[in-house]
Image (tube, coloured by chain):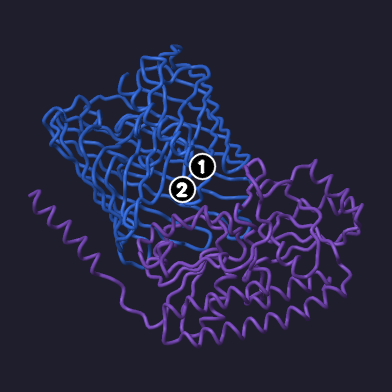
Amino acid sequence: MKIKLATLALLSFSGLLTGAMPAQAKLSVIAATPDIAALVAEIGGSEVTVDTIAKGTQDPHYIEAKPSYMTKMSHADLVVAVGLDLEVGWMPSILRGARNPKIAPGSNGFFELGSTIEPLEVPEGKITRAEGDVHPFGNPHFTLDPIRMGIAGVALAERLGQLDAPHAAAYVTRAKAFQKRMADKTKLWQARIAKSNVKEIVTYHKTLTYFFSRFGLKNPAILEPKPGIPPTSGHIMEVIATIREKKIPLIMVENYFDPTVTNRIKEDVPAVRVAVVPVAVEGAPGIKTLDDLYEKLVATVEGK
Amino acid sequence: MRRNIIYVLVLLFSLSSLAAFAAAGAGASKAFNPDISANFLGLVLRDTRGSNLRTDARHNGISFQEGELQFTADVDPYFRASALFSVAQKDNSTDFGIDPEEVYAESIALPVVTVRIGKFKAALGKNNQLHTHAYPFIDQPLINQDLLGTEGLNEAGVSAAALVPAPWFVELTLQGLGTNNAKIFNSQQSGDYAGVASLKNLWDLSDSATFEFTVFGTEGPNAGGGQSYVYGSDAIMKWRPAEGGKYKALIWQTEYLRGNLLRQATPQLSGIASWLQYQFAERWWVQARAEYEGLQPKSMELGSKRKQSLLLGFFPSEFSGFRVQYDHLLADGQKDGHDIALQWNFSIGAHPAHAY
């Protein structure tokens, strides 16, 4: 009886092993965030299918590693992540649970775009968690910089071409077109922001660092006292003092944070403008592409 | 005692070796160091039916509840290894001992299936697979403690967990284990084995909600020369809104366990635990649990237990937490028990993410 049971169990498992999914004509790509998914769709065109894990309204640091994501990744040819430790709390669990050697870290089927760009705010010397949720490899929110995304797009095209050689040239062509479009639009966006006379902006988290760096904006105060730590009343008072002293005209609250903390600031400094902004594609209605996202951020700075 | 000293020495030697590698500053050496983390749990307890003896592992007053040291790394292109050592007070003593709670290697290069070998927590329900610092409440449900023991079903063996091709998440797990569990598989024959099977399903109800349903069971020999059977199911509903999900969430979990232990002193024991966990602010949770144990036939005249628990949790960050829990225990033929406990948990190092 025991032998029969063991045989049945072995047969069940061998059936599962050989029951691989049918070969797909298109590359199946899973993106960690909607920004990455938008870039994959831009470069991959009709040669890829793309699905995403995080939603545009979710904080990408704290995504729950739902088993259903493992099912999605079990069929994937390529997983594209932000990297720079943004997904360290959830991506490894999903990758392991997917049981798909094609997308194992270190293989061609796993690609972190953070490795292709020059990161900002890379901490120097020893870091500790007393400084909050510090990323040891630098700020991971580079998807808000159109120029860096252009560079990442070219690197992504190369990786797609390695996995799908017949379409390699098409991927490179699309990536270069995207990079040029971003470069051209960035000049226009820079001119609009320069004209707005907004030079300094308060944010909730260091999410907009790359956007500000690209567009010559400064971020002299942050509502979080330390990365990942909710605002305290004492810290809010310091932020209010900074806003008054520097006459900061705008607070941009990333859409996955609670904006009610800004009510207190508004009471003390009625002149300051508060805007809840999407910081990812799909983060607000009508934000379907990276172009839409950057346009929305620029328009917010302009006060439109 | 001698064995514990050896464990401590081996552990200290390992840590000092790793520290030496790190101190050497050689980039390549550091890159290959395992992820190391430690959890420290402390407890202040006041239980009307609890022990006032410091030699009891669970006693009234303040105590260092448990420390967990975890090492995790890829071994090579084929395997990943994880070792978790638990440091806790031994019963009938004020000494502390180190136990290898989970030490295993598992495949990372096989498609569809993960094969694991070593000592690990068996796939016998959600609760049985949690480490102490990850329990939803300060303690395990009554039925888990009374049927499987305080350490749960945690044995040396082999496991294969396959992802079944389906539109939703389906995982089939089969395990073969040694029989060292004092409660259910206490056979003295070293050649005896127990089998475990689990079928886990999870459906995405929306971007914000999931429903998980698992059935599981195990069979193996006991000291009375009979077979022990344990089976059960768990159902978990989780809700965390896709918008505003940093600040609110709701979990409803129910787990049922039943044991038929042939030729044992307590031949049948079953119980159910159900609880709600509600996150009402970024760092705050409130929870309530109801339990019933003793669903065996009344003709056997075995006592039943009921328990209600309330918990308030405050988590300054994902690496620290404070929880206060009140329990009301009603057991047939005994005075009502009331206890209140404050637990703290600190986590340092690179702790692997918990399962969903």
- Image x and y of residue B85, in percent: 39, 34
- Image x and y of residue B304, in percent: 33, 27
Q: Are marks 1 and 2 on the same chain?
A: yes
* Left or right: residue B247 compared with residue A167: right
Q: Which chain is purple?
A: A
Q: Residue at x 43, y 11 (%)?
A: B53
Q: Which chain is blue?
A: B
Q: Residue at x 67, y 84 (%)?
A: A181
Name which of mark 1 and mark 2 comes first in the sequence: 1
Q: In this rendering, is residue A41 above or below A65? A: below
The amino acid type of the residue labelled 1 equals Ala
Disc 2: which chain? B
- Is disc 1 in contact with disc 2, using a CB cutoff of under 8 Å? yes
Residue B24 is marked as 1
The local crowd at label 1, few if under 14, some if 14 to 19, many if 20 or more residues have their Cα within 10 Å, is few
Q: Residue furthest top?
A: B53
* Residue A291 occupies quadrant: bottom right
- Image x and y of residue A91, in percent: 48, 58
* Residue B222 occupies quadrant: top left
Q: Secondary structure at mark 2?
A: helix
Quadrant housing the C terminus of chain A: bottom right
Q: Residue at x 84, y 51 (%)?
A: A265
The residue singled out by tag 2 in the image is B29
* Residue A85 occupies quadrant: bottom right
The amino acid type of the residue labelled 2 equals Ser
Front-most of B174 and B4? B4
